[in-house]
Image (spheres, rainbow, N blue to C red):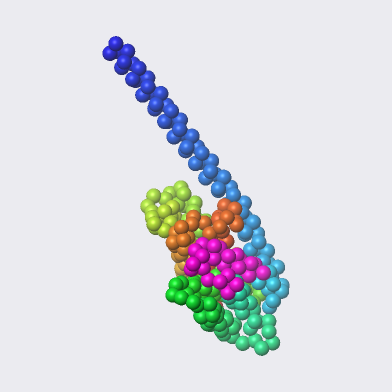
């Protein structure tokens, strides 16, 4: 009887182990399938985004100084990013949508005023003047509706923050367009593709070689190995665009390496900044507007932080 009981117990253990092994294998297989599907989606969607960016650079070059395609793309992306930010914020602290959309659109338009209006002038006077008007308008709006203590100061701060994040920061990218001709095209290509190539390099390096977490709270999947691979890819992208692109803007290898590292690092910080926003608002993605990437903010976050750094290098 004891022998029979032991045999039955062993059989039960084997069956339990087999079931557990099957479930584990199925879970791993499902996880791998989802990862492969996500990768395929990212690849085809990324190809579409690259094609759009190249088309804008090539077509707009012949439409100096209006650059209508750049205007429409930046305006559309900025307003979409504004929409996502408003959606992330709770109703009590959300500033008036009309104010935020007007502020962002006004800042985008301000970049063109000095270049297309007969009055001309310094474009940054137009941009900073508009940003000042946005700040004052945020105060006036809350003053007009104030009834009791609450979230007025928070809404003012968030309105100014949204305008700065998706209206003022893109201005550094837009102003590079007016370097003119091939120089403007090369400057935009460097500012857009260097941080995005760094992002791609970090993704694949971290996926295959990543072992040590870099930011376990803000972005748990980022690793130090991925950072190193991303910066190396950013430098390679900077070299390729600078030497094979329409116009060499970076003089010498040290400048190329320095540009790739600083702009690539700024792109990483931009990615982490957007992760901070989503974490603080309790969301995984800004939206699902871009298949495989999440929202518009998930696509442009690196460029927003990289643009001011690239501007300092290229102007």
The secondary structure that dominates the magenta segment is: helix
Spot the residue most to the top: 1
In magenta stretch: residue 226 = no
Q: Nearer the viewer, residue 117 or 245?
A: 117
In magenta stretch: residue 77 = yes
Q: Specify the segment rendered in magenta.
A: 72-100
Q: Residue 106: name its quadrant.
A: bottom right
Q: Position of residue 69 (x, y in %)?
A: 68, 69
Q: On screen, 14 above or below 23?
A: above
User: In the rendered view of the protein, which quadrant contains the C terminus?
Assistant: bottom right
Q: Is residue 115 visible?
A: yes
Left or right relative to 11: residue 57: right
Q: Residue at x 49, y 77 (%)?
A: 147
Q: Position of residue 273 (x, y in %)?
A: 46, 64
Q: Nearer the viewer, residue 154 or 59?
A: 154
Q: On screen, 164 above or below 233?
A: below
Q: Position of residue 151 (x, y in %)?
A: 46, 72
Q: Nearer the viewer, residue 163 or 202?
A: 163
Q: Position of residue 233 (x, y in %)?
A: 50, 59
Q: Residue at x 53, y 77 (%)?
A: 145
Q: Residue at x 64, y 67 (%)?
A: 76
Q: On screen, 114 above or below 46?
A: below
Q: Residue 96: name its quadrant.
A: bottom right
């Amino acid at each position: 009887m004891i022998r029979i009981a032991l045999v039955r117990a062993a059989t039960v253990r084997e069956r339990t182990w087999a079931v557990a092994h099957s479930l584990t294998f199925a879970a791993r297989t499902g996880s791998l399938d989802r990862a492969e599907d996500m990768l395929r989606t990212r690849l085809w969607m990324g190809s579409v985004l690259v094609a759009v960016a190249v088309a804008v650079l090539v077509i707009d070059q012949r439409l100096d100084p209006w650059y209508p395609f750049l205007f429409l793309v930046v305006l559309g992306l900025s307003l979409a990013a504004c929409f996502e930010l408003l959606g992330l914020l709770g109703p009590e602290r959300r500033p008036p949508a009309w104010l935020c959309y007007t502020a962002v659109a006004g800042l985008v338009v301000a970049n063109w005023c000095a270049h297309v209006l007969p009055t001309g002038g310094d474009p940054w006077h137009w941009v900073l003047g508009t940003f000042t008007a946005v700040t004052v308008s945020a105060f006036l709006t809350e003053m007009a509706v104030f009834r009791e203590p609450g979230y007025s100061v928070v809404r003012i701060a968030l309105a100014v923050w949204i305008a700065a994040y998706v209206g003022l920061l893109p201005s550094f990218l837009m102003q590079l367009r007016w370097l003119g001709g091939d120089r403007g095209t090369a400057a935009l290509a460097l500012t857009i593709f260097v941080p995005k190539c760094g992002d791609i390099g970090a993704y694949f390096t971290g996926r295959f070689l990543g072992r040590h977490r870099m930011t376990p709270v803000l972005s748990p999947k980022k690793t130090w190995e991925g950072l190193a691979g991303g910066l190396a890819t950013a430098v390679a992208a900077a070299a390729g665009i600078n030497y094979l692109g329409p116009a060499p803007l970076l003089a010498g290898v040290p400048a190329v390496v320095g540009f790739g590292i600083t702009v690539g690092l700024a792109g990483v910080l931009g990615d982490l900044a957007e992760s901070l926003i989503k974490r603080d608002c309790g969301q995984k993605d800004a939206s699902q507007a871009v298949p495989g990437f999440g929202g518009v903010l998930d696509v442009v976050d690196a460029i927003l932080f990289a643009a001011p750094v690239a501007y300092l290098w290229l102007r």
